[in-house]
Image (cartoon, grey):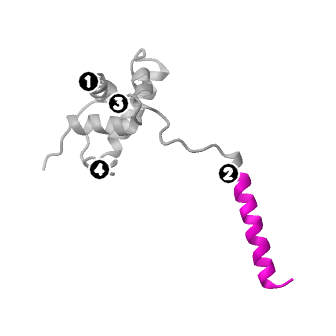
Amino acid sequence: MTAIRLVQLATAFGLVATTAVADVMPPVPESYETAGDLAGLCAMSPNSQQAQFCLGYIVGIADSMPATSLEGRGRCGPRGFVSAQLVDVVRDWLAQHDALRDRPAAAVVADALADRFTCRR
């Protein structure tokens, strides 16, 4: 078998394998949570697993803000606040921006926190 034929077979096998995997793997969603999903979780009893997920989600976004631009948002994040206060900020912001409930939760949380906690230079 010639080298060219081996390359052709390897390429064909790679295309078949890639196509087979693509057919089996589900598409990756743009966002795992919407702002509406998160608002529902945040509205649960404070000791519920859902509310704890809400808290962790919001704190995770807040912690990442200084390290990333989060789609153009400032690199500042909230400092000196307890976690529950961050949830209150996001909950209040979502109540005032109900039209954004279908947007990705991470982007909306970042907007809420960036709106409330502006950068100090």
Mark 2 or 4, closer to the camera: 2
| Mark 1: amino acid | Gln
Pick the residue in front: 102 or 35.
102
Residue 35, image x and y in percent?
Answer: 39, 30
In this rendering, position of residue 96 left or right of residue 37: left
Q: What residue is shown with label 2?
A: 22
Q: Could you say which quadrant of the image residue 84 lies in?
A: top left
Q: Residue visible at 36% across and 39% down?
A: 107
Residue positioned most to the bottom: 2
How far apart marks 2 and 4 lie (CA) works out to 32 Å
Q: What kind of residue is marked 2?
A: Ala
Q: CA distance from mark 3 to mark 4?
A: 18 Å
Separation of marks 4 and 1 at Cα, in angstroms: 22 Å
Earlier residue among tags 3 and 4: 4
Kind of residue at badge 4: Gly
Label 1, on which residue?
96
Q: Earlier in the sequence, mark 2 or mark 4?
A: 2
Q: In this rendering, which labeled residue sits more in front, label 3 or label 4?
A: 3
Q: Which residue is mark 4?
A: 72
Inspect the image, locate mark 3, and give the three-letter code of the amino acid beneath it.
Answer: Leu
Disc 2, SS: helix
Q: 36 above or below 21?
A: above
Q: Which residue is mark 3?
A: 100
Q: CA distance from mark 3 to mark 2?
A: 32 Å
* Quadrant into which the N terminus falls: bottom right
Magenta residues (range)? 1-21
